Image (tube, rainbow, N blue to C red):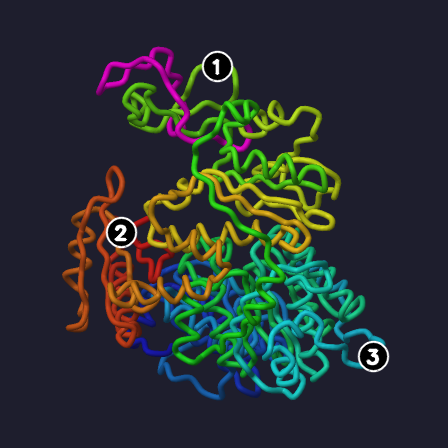
Amino acid sequence: MTGTGESEQLALLAGAGPARRRRAGQDPPAAERPVALVQVDTGLAHLDRPFEYLVPESMATGAVPGARVKVRFAGQDLAGWVLERRESAEHAGTLRPLRRLVSPEPVLTPAVLDAARTVAARYAGTLGDVLRLAVPPRHARAEQALPVTAPETEPLGPAPAAGPWSRYPAGAAFLDRLRELGSPGAAVLALPAGGPEQDWPTLLASAARACVDGGRGALLVVPDHRDVRRVEEALTAALGPGRHTRLTADQGPQARYTAFLKALRAHVPVVVGTRAAAFAPVRDLGLVAWWDDGDDLLEEPRAPYPHVREVLLARAERERAAVLAAGFVRSTAVAHLVGQGRLAAVEAPRRAVRAAVPAVRVAGEGADLERDPAVAAAHLPSVAWRAAKDALTGGPVLVQVPRRGYLPSLSCQDCRRPARCRACSGPLALAGPQGPPACRWCGRVETAFACPVCSGTRLRSSVVGAHRTAEELGRAFPGVPVERSGAGAVLDVVAGSPRLVVSTPGAEPVAEGGYAAALLLDAWALLDRPTLDAGEEALRRWCAAAALVRPASAGGAVVLAGAPTHVTVPAVEALVRWDPAWFVERELAERRELALPPTARVAAVTGSRAAVTAALGELRLPPSASTLGPLPHGETRWRALVTVPEADGVQLAQELAAMRARASARKEADAVSVRVDPRDPAA
């Protein structure tokens, strides 16, 4: 047993002697490399290390590195992965044999194992947690149904032209480097497309095709299943059928494991999927690419909470693959990579940007009711109402509403104080046009509201949801079809005929021929979010919607409603000028000055006040570290933020991992949770 004293080894194996002797007598050890180093899935931080086991002769050919096995550990059968076969053991005592060979399929490749170790170390997690994210559960039927040998495919035709990459001065050179087996790194600010042949899915597919032309594989990760479908269509057009597979978490167990095996057995050179595909074992990986890394769907909600960006960067470094980070905007994390020289900025000339983007206007919340009486029914600024009316003569109009529901937030009509539940202080909301308001937290119905400040009994809407907005627009534009896209009913595509499409951010469907206009409502609701990335997130959502609109030369218009007009807001200015690079550089400079991520490393330690205080007390932090807290975090929990310069990030992660291991060994019931580099440290 590696790194374990003889007394600890005997304690773990206590009482197992007779069974071990019977098994050994019936099945002698393997003649060659009889010792297997196994990563046991214990779920315990202090046991997150490999252990040595004896390989029986019957498993000698199947227990290869990367295979799944069952082992006896602390009185129970646990799953594990064979990491290595050795001729001799480091442990001086008697080894227990492998319990069972689950499958001889080497599902854990050396490259994926190395990347998993890097990710676990970066996020102060355990290798076992990362491997559960990396390797999907086995499905025996899928394993048996898929041929071991990859099928024959027709050779690809001549390499196509640069396609959408021709709009970027460095685009053709990037594709040439991919074909020549190079490993360039690029951060692309994608332009809105005038058609599918220039859209961002084709951009990713063209890069994958160049990689396949060079004899290597590609891994493309996008936020959700709608993006996967769009990229799949582009890959089929670029590569033909049978050269890619999709890998997503919403697939059934058999379909997901089949896709995983297709990559492992080299049936396909390209994998596209959501964050579940980040560890896909693509053979001869030559390109890792992600789209829109600012989307929170690319951040894993399970421990150790890795971001797809960091997973793919780890894989690219281990497998010497090219890196492609693309989006309509650039996140501060990607901008930081550009500043470090790890990625090269790829942008279109300003002339091409102006030709591709729609015209953007900023409207306040005032309405000229005498000039436009219909505005009262729509609760829209006059500029937005007139823009929608004019655009509906030539095509669909997109209306982005930052809140779902009907009236998700209410306040006192007289003093504007937010309306709160008397039982739990949660926000009151209306779920529909009928019925009294109810608490969004505990569900308690409020039948007799009385403001505790002014004693007012009337309520007003603080935020209008997508459902209510659709009703109001239907009254303001009689006879015009209104469609909704949001939670529970997300549309992929809408027709190019005149219609209103009300959508929450991230659920905007693609319109055939592009939208004639887009109304981005309640801008303040995104800008005023109490989060570190409020401006960055607002610009990302606005640009994603505006990119679906026709260019200004074709009459495309975007109206940003609800933004303050008396002050300059950087995110609003960046949208009007369509200059996300300027905005992110400004944002990054501010974070660097304030020592905030991504220019510094931050860890959030959360738990009871006593547990957080004790955890901070045993951490051996570098002198450069600064600690904020413990501070209240919710009703019963407390949180402390530990910040160190980027150069000391490795030491911080190591200390946090060691602290977690010690707490696990002590079997502490009141343990803290650790999250390294969270999206928003205060959330």
Tell us which disc is closer to us: 2 or 1: 1
Front one among 653 and 591: 591
Q: Which mark is residue 435?
A: 1
Disc on the earlier residue, 2 or 3: 3
- The verdict on residue 462 being magenta is yes
Residue 37: image x %, image y %?
Answer: 46, 77
Q: Which mark is residue 157?
A: 3
Crowdedness of circle 3 by 10 Å Cα count: few (<14), some, many (20+)?
A: few
Q: Report how many numbered discs are placed on residues in the image.
A: 3
Q: Residue at x 53, y 86 (%)?
A: 33
Question: Dominant secondary structure of the magenta stretch?
Answer: loop
Q: Residue at x 77, y 71 (%)?
A: 239
- The verdict on residue 494 being magenta is no
Q: Which mark is residue 606?
A: 2
Front one among 29 and 484: 484
Label 3 – label 1 distance at C-alpha:
63 Å
Q: Which residues are magenta?
A: 440-467
- Amino acid found under the numbered disc labelled 2: Thr
| Mark 2 secondary-structure assignment | strand
